[in-house]
Amino acid sequence: MEKSITPYELIGGEPAVKKLVHRFYELMEELPEAYAVRQLHPESLAGSEEMLFEYLSGWLGGPNLYIAKKGHPRLRMRHAPYNIGARERDEWMLCMTQALTEQVGDEEFRQALLNQFSELASHMINSH
């Protein structure tokens, strides 16, 4: 029986996930089009970067670092204090799309990831 390859392995494992998350937050910091979503984050993005890396590790099929530290992600509950609308979702996706485009050359794999990220980002909307 052949073991299936996880998205975590396909993207390049821990170093690649760290690189993706780091670039994602760089873009959030740099792009004026990401202003609203950036305002939802603390001044220092270091903690956010660590949490997203830990979450994505497990979400992509690698080690469940986030769950080991904090338990079930309960993403909507954890994001409830923040006013997240379509604008914030779109800005978050702008940064993630750019980071993935820079890092993931396989167009089919990248699109599959973007579809999953889009569903996840839309799920976080709690304000209209």
Image (spheres, rainbow, N blue to C red):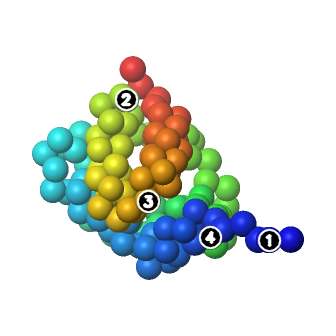
Number of residues whose C-alpha sits closer than 10 Å to that of mark 3, classed few (under 14), some (14–19) or many (20 or more): few
Between circles 2 and 1, the one closer to the viewer is 1
Q: CA distance from mark 3 to mark 1?
A: 22 Å
Mark whose residue sits in front, 4 or 1: 1
Check disc 3 and report its element: helix, strand or loop: loop
Q: Earlier in the sequence, mark 4 or mark 1?
A: 1
Q: Which mark is residue 2?
A: 1
Q: Residues within 10 Å of mark 2 (few under 14, many from 20)?
A: some
Label 2 or label 4, whichever comes before in sequence order: 4
Front-most of 110 and 14?
Answer: 110
**Circles 3, 1 touching at the beta carbon (< 8 Å):** no
Q: Is residue 82 left or right of residue 63?
A: left
Residue 67 appears anywhere in the view: yes
Query: As shown in the figure, which amino acid type bears the numbered disc 3?
Result: Asp
Identify which residue, 117 or 40, lies in the foreground.
117
As measured in the structure, the alpha-carbon distance from the residue carrying label 3 to the one carrying label 2 is 30 Å
Local secondary structure at mark 4: loop
What residue is pinned by disc 2?
A: 85
- Disc with the residue nearer the chain's start (2 vs 1): 1
User: Which quarter shows the N terminus?
Assistant: bottom right
Q: Which mark is residue 62?
A: 4
Say which element carries label 2: loop
Residue kind at label 1, given as amino acid type: Glu
Q: Which residue is mark 3?
A: 106
Which circle's residue, 3 or 2, is located before the other in the chain?
2
| Quarter of the image where one finds residue 71 | bottom right
Q: Residue 39: tell me if it is visible.
A: no
